[in-house]
Amino acid sequence: MFKRIAICLILSISFVSCNEREKKEDSDIIIDRKKIDAVFNKNVSKLLLDHLYVVVDSITYERLTNDNQWKNTYASLDLGLPDFAPVHDHSSTCYLRGHQHYIEILGPKNSYNEPVGKSGIGFSLQNQDEHFHLGVQPKMKASKDSFLYATETVEIPLGLDQHTWFKAFYTPSPGTALHTWYAFYNPVFLDSLYGKHHTSYSREAFLKPTYANKKLFNGIKEIYLTCTPEDYLRITQELGYLRCKLLKKNGKTLTIKGGDITVRIEPSGEIEYSRITQITCELNEKDHSIIQLGNLTITNQGTESIWNFDQLYINNP
């Protein structure tokens, strides 16, 4: 599925005298890895999952935010930046925090006016030996062409000032219900948020004050996507440009190593919009409970937790 780029490397070798050649045979060969990576475009940005979001119906959102037994055992919930306040009855968006990832759950009356069923996946990027700056660009195995060429810098108000949180790259996809974006994060934002110096940005540092490892949820392992043909092409090309490894191909269903998670993506000509159908999460300890939160079913199997959204899409076509 991914584009293959054929690169021919022509080596010009100059021969010197026999004496000089014998001397060089005894010397160490110095290999410039950076130049080789530049030729073959192997020096791509490091990709990791940051978070994902799903817009659920009112019943699911109400059950998820008001089931105290589930909240007390599964994960910490909050209202997000700037102060991570506790969820209350009038909230329209909440955040479920893990060790390295988090899940954003939006209700139908969310402030972004996102419709029920819409979803998105945000990845973080990092370039080797490069600090965050507003001119940072993703390093990919091919030129951008028509993928990941659009950008947006996100600022968050903290106190009296606006602070740059991240710079995101994405492929404009009018009408899509499944957004993907890839962002470089600013460590100075963590300094402003927590009043402590950070030499680099890490997901763990951002989540540390709100992550409760005494609860079950640790993070995300696998994301299942069912996509329209257009979104299928876009997402597979984006991950391919960032040199994500294709683990398995079963017909048109692809299993891709997307940094620290696995993405399973299949195309469908029978759906009106793309969607996240399932999330497999990692738990901090074994559990075998099953809970129905409106149209969301969460099934814990040992140290895995499976979120199934099929009922959400059946009841909200």
Image (spheres, rainbow, N blue to C red):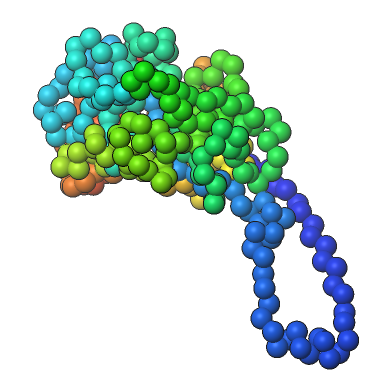
Q: Is residue 119 above or below residue 222?
A: above
Horizontal arrangement in the rendering, residue 270 relative to residue 292 (left or right): right
User: Where does the image place residue 208, in percent across and percent down from the top left?
Assistant: 27, 40
The one of 7 and 252 positioned closer to us in this rendering? 7
Q: Is residue 6 above or below residue 3?
A: below
User: Where does the image place residue 104, in percent across and percent down from the top left?
Assistant: 34, 26
Horizontal arrangement in the rendering, residue 235 relative to residue 11 (left or right): left
The residue depicted at 70 percent of the width and 40 percent of the height is 143
State the residue lying farthest toward the left.
69
User: Where does the image place residue 140, in percent across and percent down from the top left?
Assistant: 63, 44
The residue depicted at 21 percent of the width and 46 percent of the height is 284
> Considering the image in quadrants, where does the N terminus appear?
top right
Count the numbered circles shown: 0
Choose top left, top right, bottom left or bottom right for residue 279: top left
Please indicate, yes or no, whether residue 218 appears anywhere in the rendered image: yes
Please indicate, yes or no, whether residue 54 appears anywhere in the rendered image: no
Choose top left, top right, bottom left or bottom right for residue 146: top right
The one of 256 and 243 positioned closer to us in this rendering? 243
User: Where does the image place residue 235, in percent across and percent down from the top left?
Assistant: 56, 33
Choose top left, top right, bottom left or bottom right for residue 122: top left
The one of 300 and 142 positioned closer to us in this rendering? 142
The residue depicted at 21 percent of the width and 19 percent of the height is 87
Horizontal arrangement in the rendering, residue 288 relative to residue 238 (left or right): left
> Considering the image in quadrants, where does the C terminus appear?
top left
The residue depicted at 27 percent of the width and 30 percent of the height is 96
